[in-house]
Image (cartoon, rainbow, N blue to C red):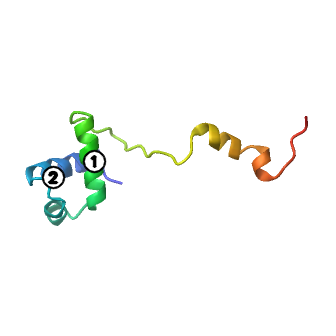
Amino acid sequence: MYSLEDRIKAVKLYIKYGKSAAAVIRELGYPNRHSLASWYKEYVNTNGNLPAKHERKGKFTKEVLKIQKGPEAKGLSVPE
């Protein structure tokens, strides 16, 4: 996990080096090119205001997870 300052530093270098991920990674030693591209997209979409914490998108919605964690998901019968 990288701090907000680390992510902003990497994105600004990415812009400075003409979006060359290899140059940024060579200089900083982090991140991988996929993370850098993701941080850049987020930076552009938020007008330069990266959130302090990066939120991952879940595979399932909260409603689906509630259903999966219920008694039926564990093979238990539900009294009517």
Q: What element does badge 2 sit on? A: helix
Give the number of callouts. 2
- Considering only order in the chain, which callout, 2 or 1, is on the residue closer to the N terminus? 2
Residue at the disc numbered 1:
39
Q: Residues within 10 Å of mark 2 (few under 14, many from 20)?
A: many
Query: At which x and y percent is residue 5?
Result: 23, 46
Q: Residue at x 57, y 40 (%)?
A: 61
Query: At which x and y percent is residue 18?
Result: 9, 53
Q: Whole-Å distance between the Cαs marked 1 and 2?
A: 10 Å
Name which residue type carries label 1: Trp
Q: In terms of image quadrants, where is residue 67?
A: top right
Do the residues under discs 1 and 2 have CB atoms within 8 angstroms?
yes
Q: Is residue 6 above or below residue 51?
A: below
Query: At which x and y percent is residue 37?
Result: 26, 52
Q: Which mark is residue 27?
A: none
Q: What element does badge 1 sit on? A: helix
Q: Residue at x 75, y 49 (%)?
A: 73
Q: Residue at x 63, y 43 (%)?
A: 65
Q: Is residue 41 above or below residue 75?
A: above
Q: In terms of image quadrants, where is residue 35?
A: bottom left
Query: In the visual, does 51 lie left or right of 72?
Result: left
Q: Which mark is residue 14?
A: 2
Q: Residue at x 22, y 39 (%)?
A: 44
> What is the quadrant of the C terminus in the image?
top right
